[in-house]
Every structure is written in structure tokens, then in C-alpha cells.
Image (tube, helix red, strand yellow):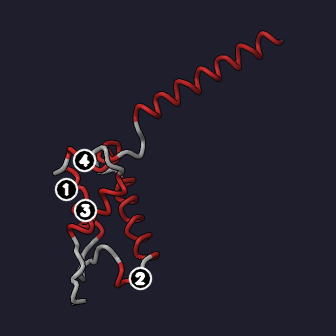
Amino acid sequence: MKMNLRRILAIFATTCVICAQTHAAEDVGSTAWWMEQCNKGKFSCAAFIDGFVAGVQASLPSGTRPFCFPKGVTNGQINRVVINYINDRPQKLHIPFYELVYTALASGFPCDPSGD
């Protein structure tokens, strides 16, 4: 019985190590990983960007937001601006995805300082 328990624990520990190494190798959450999802048209990419936008809009008053969307802009258009911005800058894939999403949105949809 003790031998079976040890064997089970050894298998479990080995599995945990392998899973952790695989997870680390994929670097889930990195810009490189996210851009693979985005370039494949995965829903998770659009959901992340849409959630990021919603979070900024909910947490910052309109006069202090780093980006402003023109009337009629669609979520699909916003997502394309972010994806194109990052695809055009492969040297930045090491930067966290949320930082590049922020920069892409601020660059693509700057706020008019006059308030118009």
C-alpha cells in the first residue's frame, strides 16, 4: 500500500513539473501568446481587448481617459487597430500585452485636447 501511494505521488509530482514547464514555455499571457490567439481570430483576443476597454472606461472619468472613440466605432474596428498596431511592432512582443493594448488604443484613438 505504501509503495502504491509513493508511486502515485511520484507520478503526480512528475506530472505537475511537466505541466508547469509546458505552461512556462507557452508563456500564457505574454504578448507573443496573445498575438497568436489574435492572428488566429480567437474569441479570447477580442474578449480581452473589449474587457480592457470596458475596464478603463468604467474606472476613469471621461476627461482623464487615455483614448477616446469616435462616434460609431465598432468593437471589431477597435480590435483591428490593436492587432495591426502590435503586428507592425514585432520587436515589442516581450512587453506585456495589456501595455501594448493601452498604447495601441491611445495611439489609434487619441483624445482631442480641446474636448471636441
Closer to viewer: mark 4 or mark 1: 4
What is the distance, in whole Å, between disc 4 and disc 1 at their CAs? Answer: 13 Å
* SS label for mark 2: loop
Q: Earlier in the sequence, mark 2 or mark 4?
A: 2
- The span from disc 3 to disc 1 (Cα, nearest Å) is 9 Å
Quadrant of the rendering where the N terminus is positioned: top right
CA separation, marks 2 and 3?
20 Å
Q: Considering only order in the chain, which callout, 3 or 2, is on the residue closer to the N terminus?
A: 2
Give the SS element for disc 1: helix
Residue 60 shown left or right of residue 84 in the figure: right
Quarter of image, res 81: bottom left
Q: Which residue reaches farthest left? A: 88
Q: Are marks 4 and 3 in contact (CB under 8 Å)?
A: no
What amino acid is found at the position of numbered circle 3 in the picture? Answer: Ala
Residue plotted at (64% across, 18% down): 11
- Within the image, what quadrant is residue 54 found in? bottom left
Above or below for 34 versus 20: below
Residue to which mark 1 is pinned: 84
Tell me the residue that label 2 is attached to: 61
Q: Residues within 10 Å of mark 2 (few under 14, many from 20)?
A: few
Q: Tell how many labels.
A: 4
Q: Amino acid at mark 2?
A: Pro
Spatial CA distance of label 4 from label 3 is 12 Å
| Residue that badge 4 annotates | 92
Kindly identify the residue that appears in the image at 34 percent across and 57 percent down. 99
Rendered image: mark on residue 104: 3
